[in-house]
Amino acid sequence: MSYQSSIEWTETTWNPVTGCTKVSPACAHCYAETFAERFRGTRGHPFEQGFDLKLWPQRLGLPLTWKEPRMIFVNSMSDLFHKDVPDAFVGQVFDTMAQAHWHTFQLLTKRPKRLADWAETRGRWPRNVWAGVSIESQDYAWRADDLLRVPAEIKFLSIEPLLGPVKLKNSVLRKIQWVIVGGESGHHARPMRPEWARDLRDQCQELGVPFFFKQWGLHDANGQRHRSKKQAGRLLDGRTWDAMPELTPA
């Protein structure tokens, strides 16, 4: 299963794994779980099992059939480094990404220790695979420390949904190539305060780190709740922030 994605910082999603379990407050209103559970029990549907974790070996070769280069978000409906995804299957996903060298793969996890431990056993990391971790508040800023153990050329932070202020250590941020920030969407969305987003933008600007402001979520900069994230918009201080990292020439 793959989709042309509406996520602002990618083009396509690829889900060789679906389903997950909650590990931190950001997971409370998981968009993927909400979507998947709508179809639990629907015979023949890809989410017949709801949000229970499932491996899809028949999807492993999909990126090899896409001949035009794409930016691909890996497992938008799961987490590749969930404890119930076998190491051997993770390896098969990486084999595909390495073979499909004309694509760029964006790998994002809330389980950075397993990511870092696994990377140390993998050996050579494919240049076309970006490694990222999710952070929602200062309590989870430690995830960036584990990310630094990963030998990816592009390491990024997805600070979304931003549920509180986050101050990143300069020694960490200097080794990060991209930061994404966004508020929460969905029926139970929690508001993001403007000063939290501005402070992260300023931290990135000070050190020259590309900054991408994804969305306000359901609450705009004035705290007003809207019916959709599109209505709330994605302007921060009157403009969009769409910086992306660039791979250096091989």
Image (cartoon, helix red, strand yellow):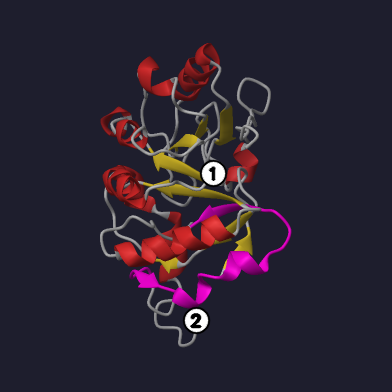
Residue where numbered disc 2 is placed: 45
The disc, 2 or 1, on the residue closer to the chain's N-terminal end is 2
Q: Which quadrant of the figure has residue 127? A: top right
In the rendered image, residue 123, in percent from the top left (x then y), is placed at 38, 48
Q: Nearer the viewer, residue 133 or 186?
A: 133
In the rendered image, residue 184, in percent from the top left (x then y), is placed at 46, 42
What's the mark number on residue 127?
1
Residue at 46% over, 39% down: 152
Q: Nearer the viewer, residue 50 or 229?
A: 50
Q: Quadrant of the N terminus?
A: bottom right
Residue at 60% over, 25% down: 236
Residue at 44% over, 41% down: 132
- Asked if one can make out residue 168 in the rendered structure from this viewpoint, the answer is no
Residue at 56% over, 17% down: 208
In the rendered image, residue 229, in percent from the top left (x then y), is placed at 58, 44
- Residue 184 to residue 105: above or below: above
- Asked if one can make out residue 212 in the rendered structure from this viewpoint, the answer is yes
- The amino acid beneath tag 2 is His
Magenta residues (range): 51-74
Q: Quadrant of the C terminus?
A: top right
Image check: 238 left or right of 42?
Answer: right
Q: Nearer the viewer, residue 40 or 170?
A: 170
In the rendered image, residue 55, in percent from the top left (x then y), is placed at 39, 72
Q: Secondary structure at mark 2?
A: loop
- The amino acid beneath tag 1 is Arg
**Is residue 70 a member of the stretch shown in magenta?**
yes
